[in-house]
Amino acid sequence: MTDIANTSPPRLGRLDDLPRAGLFHAPTHMEPMANLGAALGTKRPLLVKRDDLTDMAFGGNKVRQLEFYLGEAQAQGADTVLITGAVQSNFARLAAAGARKLGMDCHIQLEERVAKNDPRYRNSGNVLIERLLGATLHSYPEGEDEAGADRQLGEIAEGLRQAGRKPYIIPLAPGHAPLGALGYVDMARELLQQVEAAGLTVDDIIIPSGSGATHGGFLFGLRALGSQIPVTGICVRRDAAQQKPRIEHRCQEIADLLEVENPVPADDVVVTDAFLAPGYGKASDEVLDAIRLAARMEALILDPVYSGKTMAGFIDTAKRAEGEGALIFIHTGGTPAIFAYEGDLTA
């Protein structure tokens, strides 16, 4: 079904009043994937929203999120940004890039989320770019301890304060104002305008579901703008039983931040973990096949961590779904990470 934002004033509260750093040129393209559709034997329109093309340092969905975090950092007079993430974190790479564009330093804490000792994983891809950007790298020995990772990041920040710096922390664990999610509240507005301009009927939008900022923000934005287009989140880190309440909570946090009513009921949060195995940062044969198919049919470069799993879910939906409406794949980027997974992709 197609649902375009209603003509009443948007229920986005304080969104346009919050500090925001301009890091890319919107809108990103929405493109047809006719070759992929032919390969899958479907005549329904398949489209990709190219959020891998957000201008900065190989792009990706985190650029939209960073506009709000770094806008607040600037408003606070920060001179250093701190962030924690996996060794091949796209968020960390783009935080360093955004900080540099705005004249700030960046400290990155790399967590051991993926048991992968391949030198390419530890030194290529996002890590290489972070070093080129001059980020200071730290390590954290755990991969599933969000609160602990945030605590250690706080200790690094305290050391910087004592040295006379003004640090700004981008937190990992829930319980903090979800500024990054606002980038995808705003993207929902952008996408609805593109859908309306193209005269599309949309049956489903497929999006990765990890921290919840992208999935939760986008779902919130659609519903706040009056659209009931279905959204399916593809679990990339946690199983569905853990991820669904995380997205529900994220949507409530967004409502609290924007000082509006939460437009997302619990039964509107749809996630699947059918493409998660063998786990975060690892790819099944099905996911690797989806990555190869997207490259060979549409010249889309996907990563095994986020966008590849999401494409596997998108392909499955395109094969099984009834109806003739369009399906939209949200391409969140992650391109540099493919170089860290050379062994998996060429096996």
Image (spheres, grey):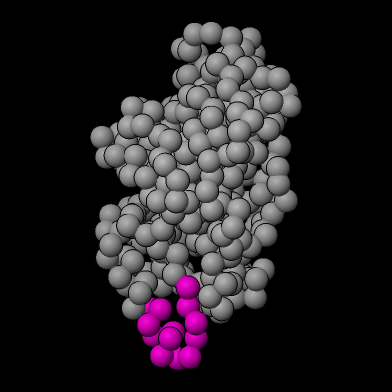
The residue at the point 73 percent across, 27 percent down is: 197
Q: Nearer the viewer, residue 133 or 216?
A: 216
Residue 43 position in % (x across, y down): 63, 9
Position of 232 relative to 245 (above/below): above
Position of 37 relative to 273 (above/below): above
Do we see residue 91 in this rendering? yes
Residue 246 appears left or right of 195: left
Do we see residue 106 in this rendering? no
Residue 276 position in % (x across, y down): 36, 35
Q: Nearer the viewer, residue 34 or 339?
A: 34
Quarter assignment of residue 71? bottom right
The residue at the point 67 percent across, 59 percent down is: 22
Residue 299 position in % (x across, y down): 68, 33
Residue 259 appears left or right of 35: left
Which quadrant of the figure contains the N terminus?
A: top right
Position of 247 relative to 124 (above/below): above
Q: Which residues are magenta?
A: 156-168
Question: Is 69 a magenta residue?
Answer: no
The residue at the point 60 percent across, 30 percent down is: 5
Residue 189 position in % (x across, y down): 61, 38
The residue at the point 34 percent across, 78 percent down is: 155
Residue 56 appears left or right of 342: right
Q: Nearer the viewer, residue 150 or 226?
A: 226
Quarter assignment of residue 21? bottom right
Question: Is 166 a magenta residue?
Answer: yes
